[in-house]
Image (tube, rainbow, N blue to C red):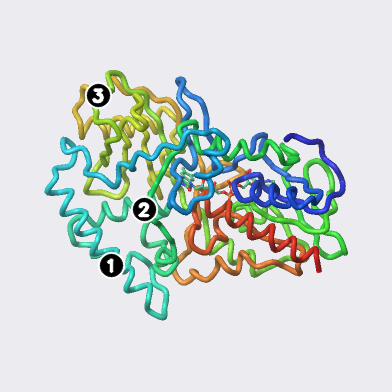
């Protein structure tokens, strides 16, 4: 619910992404006077559904991971959204024309060995880089690293083994036909939100928290800060007095890069419904392509890490031409004229995200708890990066917002 700027409220929530929306809704339900401050002109943050070519396309989150423990499944059903339970293509054999089945089996066996080494490494006292568990000279290592770029937004060398091991995944994954972003944006309908109002400073010296915004100064009894770690680490929001522990924690939990590209497909029936191919199986800089998601005449491409960072600089046309070449190398040149660019994300250069989702740098798996802890019972921190086990996800962000709202309620009661 769009609302004009005001100068005072009980609780200011900064950031109308999944975390901020969950916090603001819980605090509003508890009858507090809440104002949600959002820098963009839309809610949802890294959850974003756009219409292109008549299709609802998720340019940010798309999968309801751990769907058996994901509160958005129930929320979606209650709001009349369509929950699609088709298993994801990465849990099935891939399109054999592009990846022979004996090679797929060898790749999955190598990946399983890698994950088992990683699990062991995570039990050691000293945290290590996940790449220490990769046998660089063994076959499939480049592809195992490519999968890390989609899952973690970074190559294994930048990933903490302990943090990765802390992630919980029930391996049940659903989707929302109308878009995950559309669902999360709908949750803004009943929260008073000031859009186009970036926050630049938070002064927590006085009795009230004083929040500097593009619309003026807002005084609140407490604030929930639910912005991405890269925004905090680059001091786009400055705290006065400074909170060095938060700055360090945010910097050690950077957002990796994951980008998506959608191509429209002519005569799509020639491709398998809900199929999947990799662009290349012997290198890390490559895309993973979901063929005919929801049975639609589309290819949904996933790109991660340095590959995603460099491709977004090329704009939609350059990005698409990389993908079309990879797909034609795999499926044949006749596909060139049947694939047309529809939309691509560019999360690294998005000024209100500066990346896609958080990972812990090696040695810094403990920083999620540091980032999550309240300051003087007046500043509360939410966002996917503060989630202990569901970090990097939308439902992790949602749960962190509920956790921060509970902290606010018990602080205000005392
Ligand atoms: C390509 C991609 C694919 C993904 N796939 C999945 C998936 O399949 N499943 C899944 O669960 N998750 C996925 N994710 C991750 C998921 O989208 C995020 O973890 C989640 O949406 C983050 O929510 P958040 O509330 O923590 O942060 P955000 O959504 O980033 O919300 C923060 C809000 O703060 C605002 N903001 C920033 N700076 C300021 C400021 N100075 N002043 C005021 N407002 C500010 C932003 O505009 C934003 O609205 C994906 C993300 C990307 C990018």
The residue that disc 2 covers is 171
Residue 149, placed above or below residue 252: above
Tell me which numbered mark, 1 or 2, is placed earlier along the sequence: 1
Mark 1 C-beta to ligand 1 under 8 Å = no
Residue 157, numbered label = none
Residue ID at (49%, 31%): 178
Residue ID at (36%, 54%): 148
Position in image of residue 213 (x %, y %): 78, 46
The residue that disc 1 covers is 116
Q: Residue furthest front?
A: 78
The residue that disc 3 covers is 335
Position in image of residue 105 (x %, y %): 16, 52
* Mark 2: secondary structure: loop
Residue 276, placed above or below residue 51: below
Q: CA distance from mark 1 to mark 2?
A: 17 Å
Q: Is residue 200 visible?
A: no
């Amino acid at each position: 619910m769009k609302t004009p700027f005001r100068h005072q409220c009980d609780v200011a929530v900064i950031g109308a992404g999944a975390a901020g929306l969950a916090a603001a809704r819980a605090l509003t339900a508890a009858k507090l006077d809440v104002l949600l401050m959002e820098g963009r002109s839309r809610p949802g943050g890294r959850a974003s559904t756009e219409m292109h070519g008549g299709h609802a396309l998720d340019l940010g989150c798309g999968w309801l991971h751990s769907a058996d423990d994901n509160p958005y499944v129930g929320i979606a059903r209650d709001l009349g959204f369509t929950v699609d339970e088709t298993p994801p293509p990465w849990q099935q054999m891939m399109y054999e024309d592009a990846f022979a089945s004996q090679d797929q089996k060898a790749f999955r066996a190598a990946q399983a060995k890698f994950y088992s080494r990683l699990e062991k490494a995570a039990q050691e006292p000293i945290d290590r880089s996940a790449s220490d568990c990769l046998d660089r000279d063994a076959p499939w290592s480049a592809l195992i690293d490519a999968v890390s770029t989609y899952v973690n937004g970074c190559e294994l060398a930048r990933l903490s083994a302990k943090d990765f091991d802390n992630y919980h995944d029930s391996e049940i994954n659903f989707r929302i036909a109308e878009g995950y972003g559309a669902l999360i944006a709908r949750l803004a309908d009943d929260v008073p939100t000031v859009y186009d109002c970036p926050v630049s400073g938070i002064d927590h010296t006085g009795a009230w928290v004083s929040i500097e915004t593009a619309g003026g100064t807002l005084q609140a009894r407490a604030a929930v800060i639910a912005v991405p770690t890269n925004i905090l680490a680059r001091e786009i929001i400055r705290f006065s007095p400074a909170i060095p522990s938060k700055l360090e924690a945010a910097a050690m939990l950077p957002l990796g890069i994951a980008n998506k590209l959608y191509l429209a497909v002519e005569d799509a029936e020639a491709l398998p419904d809900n199929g999947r191919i990799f662009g290349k199986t012997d290198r890390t800089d490559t895309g993973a392509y979901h063929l005919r998601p929801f049975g639609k005449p589309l290819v949904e491409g996933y790109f991660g890490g340095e590959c995603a960072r460099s491709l977004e600089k090329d704009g939609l046309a350059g990005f698409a031409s990389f993908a079309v070449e990879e797909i034609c190398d795999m499926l044949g040149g006749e596909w060139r004229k049947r694939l047309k660019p529809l939309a691509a994300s560019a999360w690294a250069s998005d000024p209100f995200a500066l990346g896609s989702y958080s990972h812990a740098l090696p040695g810094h798996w403990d920083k999620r708890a540091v980032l999550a802890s309240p300051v003087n019972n007046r500043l509360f921190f939410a966002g996917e990066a503060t989630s202990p086990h569901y970090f990097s996800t939308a439902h992790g962000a949602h749960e962190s917002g509920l956790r921060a709202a509970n902290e606010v309620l018990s602080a205000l009661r005392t």
